[in-house]
Image (tube, rainbow, N blue to C red):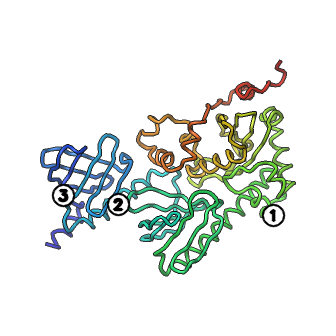
Amino acid sequence: MESTDNAREAFGDVFECACDIQGKGVHDAKVRLDGETLNIETEDGRALLLKARQISALDIGDIDIRITAQASAIRLFRFGRRFDKAAELIGLWYKKGKLADSVVMEKSLETFDDIQYELSRKGRRPASLRMYAMYAAIVDSRNGKVKRMPYPYIRDILDEGLSVNVRMQKGPDIALSMLGRRKDVFLKRLRELIDSLANDVGTRAAEMLGMEAESRAKEISGALPDGRAIPLGAIGAKSPLLAEALMHKASETKLAPIIEKSDELAFGFKKGSIGGLDDDYIWMVARLGGIAVMETVLALEDSSRAAYLFDMQGQLFQAFVEDLSWCLTLVGFRREPIYLSDEALREPGRESYLQAVEDVPELARLRTIYKGRVAHTDGGSWVEKILEAAGKQPPGGR
C-alpha cells in the first residue's frame, strides 16, 4: 500500500477526501496537485482548477483545509491518515505560488526552512525565512502570507537562546525559533546585510548629491535610511551638510515652486530593486497646507511619471511621512496599492497588493486619504496643477 502511495505521489499527488463548496453539500472528492494547478474533482462531476494567485486565503486547521478563492469558498476534510501529507503539500504549493507572484522578483541570499515565528508573542506558527538584499521575508506555511522585515526598520536584535527576537521600529516585533544550529548563521547574515545596505545607501546618496562618498557614507545612511522619508529638520540635526545638499539639488529641479510654497519637507532615499523595476532615487514629501505631495527629486533616469497627492486630514506631518514610508516599503515601493480601485486590486496578479491592504492598517487608511495623481507634462504645467490643488497660488498667479 505504501509503495502505491509513493508511486502516485511521484506522478502528481492525489488525495481522497470530502469537499464542501459554498456550504451547498458534502461530496466525495479527489484532490490532485499538478505543477502550478490544484485540481478538485467531486463525485457529482464538478471540477475546479485553481492556481495560487486565484486564492485569497488558505487556512489549514487540525482536520480540514479551507480555501477562499475569487468566486467560491471550499472546505476539504476527511483525508484520514493522509491529512498531514495533504496539508504539507498543499501549503507548500500555495507558498511557492505566492512567492512567484511577489511584488519584487529577487533571488534570496539565504533561506531557512521549517522554522517558527511569532508576532508580538501571540502564538507561534510554522514558516520559512528568506533573506534578500533589503529585507527578510517570512512565509507562513499554513496560509502562504508573506511578512516583510525591512532592514532599516529593525531597531534591535536580541539573542534569547532558543529564539531570536527582532524588535521593529514600526509593526509588531518578530520572534524566530526552531533555527537550530543555523541560528548563529542567521544572526551573522542579518547583521551583514543590514550593514551592507546602509553602506550602499550612504555611498549612492553621496554620489547622487555630489558629496564625498567615502567619508560621508555612514553619516548619510544614519540620517537617511533606505526607504524612509525623514523630515528635513531631523536630517539637518544629524547631518547639516546632507540637509543642505538635498535642498540645493531639489531647488534646481522643476519642484522648486513646490519647495518654495511648502510648509514642511521630508526627503528619502530608495535603493533600486535587484529585479530591475527601478533604479536608485531620492524622493520628497512636501506639505502644502493640509495636502501632502509625494514626488521623485533625483534619479539616474527620469522615470517618475506623476506626483501623488494626499489629504492629511489633520494628521501631523511626521506621522504621515512615517506611515507613507512604511506602506511603500512593504509593497516594494510600488504605487499601485495606493491608487488602484478595490475592484482592480482583486484582479489576478495583484494578490500581494491586496494582502498588504488587508494586513497593514496604515495602507488601508492611506487609500482613503489619497486624492489623486498629477501626471507629468511637458512645460511644467503639472507643477501649477499641484499648487492649485493644494490651494497655493502658482508662481505669477493672482
> SS class of the residue under badge 2?
helix
Q: Amino acid at mark 1?
A: Glu
The location of residue 48, given as percent across then percent down, is 24, 46
Is the C-beta separation of discs 1 and 3 under 8 Å? no
In space, the residues marked 1 and 3 are separated at their CA atoms by 63 Å
Query: In this picture, is 172 found above or below 358?
Result: below
Please name the amino acid that badge 3 sits on: Cys
Give SS at disc 1.
Answer: helix
For this rendering, which residue is in front, 84 or 186? 84
Task: Identify the residue at image location x=18%, y=55%.
Answer: 18
Q: Which residue is at 52% across, 75% downward? A: 163
Q: Which residue is mark 1?
A: 214
Q: Are marks 3 and 2 in contact (CB under 8 Å)?
A: no
* Disc nearest the viewer among 1 and 2: 2
First-in-chain label (1 vs 3): 3
Residue 379 visible? The answer is no
Question: Does 261 appear above or below 128?
Answer: above
The residue tagged 2 is: 91
Q: Residues within 10 Å of mark 3 (few under 14, many from 20)?
A: many
Q: Position of residue 139 (x, y in %)?
A: 45, 61
Q: Position of residue 30 (x, y in %)?
A: 18, 55
What residue occupies the far top of the structure in this picture? 398
Q: Quadrant of the C terminus?
A: top right
Which sits earlier in the primary sequence, circle 3 or circle 2?
3
Q: Amino acid at mark 2?
A: Gly
Residue underneath mark 3: 17
Q: CA distance from mark 1 to mark 2?
A: 47 Å
| Front residue of this view, candidates 177 and 248 | 177
